[in-house]
Amino acid sequence: MRWSSRIVAAALVAILQACATPPAQTPPPPAAIAETRPPVTILISIDGFRADYLQRGVTPNLLHLAAEGITGPMRPSFPSKTFPNHWTLVTGMVPDHHGIVGNRMEDPAHPGETFTTASDAPYWWNAAAPIWVEAEKAGIRTGTVFWPGANVAWGSTAIKADHGDYPGGTRPRDWLQYNQAISDTQRVDTALDWLRRPAADRPRFVTLYFDRVDMVGHTHGPDSPAVTQAAAQVDAKIGMLLQGLAALHQPANLIVVSDHGMSETSDTRVVPLGLPKDSYHLIEAGPFAALNPLPGKEALVEKALLGRHPHMECWHKAEIPARFRFGSNSRIAAIFCLADPRWLIVEKLPDTPFTHGEHGYDNRAPDMAALFVAAGPAFRHGTVPAFDNVDITPLLRDLLGLPTRPGLDGDDAPFQGLLRSR
């Protein structure tokens, strides 16, 4: 369902200016009239939403937000994968520093264990505090509807208890365990339900996560009609959120982002590693390959891989180009290979034809460009020059009134002059 421009504009006026009045036929009780709601900060991730999807003519709600607020090209961090970038967006640190260096990784300090997108052991995540932990410690109530890492008892160093949880640690006050079966409509409804609570129980910071665009992009490729349809569907949910906020007379600062873009891939653009199976341990392959030579096979693997190849380049981890800000973390494999955009690194040639979508490439590649739109009472109207996604956390800190935190990889410089004085 697509909201008409008239409805969208009305909702935006109510949300951004917080000046709507209730219908005369249903006057609210005096307490509700007297309440002045402070703005809520809502961080929305549309996984895999490439920046240029905004130009497909199917996202009126996002375009209205951009017209009322600020927008600009945002670079993901390297590698341009889901979990590393979602953790960067809420910690202000690059993957090399916050420790989530891939969707799949291994840690020499925990031999025999492999991180996957289902891993919730706090030791994987504890190197950098997410924004909701800092907010909760400052007395700001938070709620997360599906954000990678939000289910983790951050800071816990305990062993998992018999009841299946990690004692200690900090989570958002309200959070949902990821469940793909929960629809986008239910996700929006959950966030709005939290905001219907009395002021003392109402979150001031909320995250929302939508994954349909990414899933469809992987299956059908970014240039498919299916992705355009998925973009339209998630935009309608943004409209649903705007309508709900307007009905609550809830002013909101909305920051809508994606973690990365998407590039078309094909069985005709693959680079086989060409190594004997008994010579290496592969952790991840695709747009990049992360692998460790097996003992005694180091020279063989290094000779075969290191250097530039057609559509692929490989390095010792310590020699990965500095512009990637990637290579010092102990969880990064000894040898790292990066494919050219639209190419895939594989162990063996595919048996069947395919056209799909992938991400994980050079974070400056145009296809990896991420979405950024922000609007609300804190924002003026304008365009942000190209910036890195490590700058989102400092922006969130400004909106929540948290003090500047030393040691972050980003800062709020890109947004100076675009924020209204508090």
Image (spheres, rainbow, N blue to C red):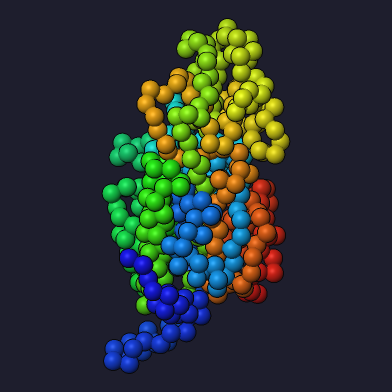
Whether residue 267 appears in this view of the structure is yes
Looking at this view, name the residue that lies furthest to the bottom. 24
Give how far across and how far down residue 325 sits, in percent.
66, 38
State the residue in front, 356 or 282: 356
Q: Residue at x 45, y 21 (%)?
A: 349
Asked if residue 145 lies left or right of residue 111, the reply is left
State the residue in front, 265 or 197: 265
Image quarter in which the C terminus is found = bottom right
When the figure is inspected, residue 372 is found, relative to residue 161, above or below; the finding is below
Give how far across and how far down residue 413 sits, in percent.
70, 60
Image quarter in which the N terminus is found = bottom left
Q: Residue at x 50, y 67 (%)?
A: 63
Looking at this view, name the residue that lies furthest to the top. 296
Q: Residue at x 63, y 23 (%)?
A: 309
When the figure is inspected, residue 67 is found, relative to residue 276, above or below; the finding is below
Whether residue 111 appears in this view of the structure is no
Asked if residue 106 lies left or right of residue 7, the reply is right
Give how far across and how far down residue 273 sits, in percent.
53, 19
Q: Total marks drawn?
A: 0
Q: Residue at x 47, y 12 (%)?
A: 277
Which quadrant holds residue 31? Answer: bottom left
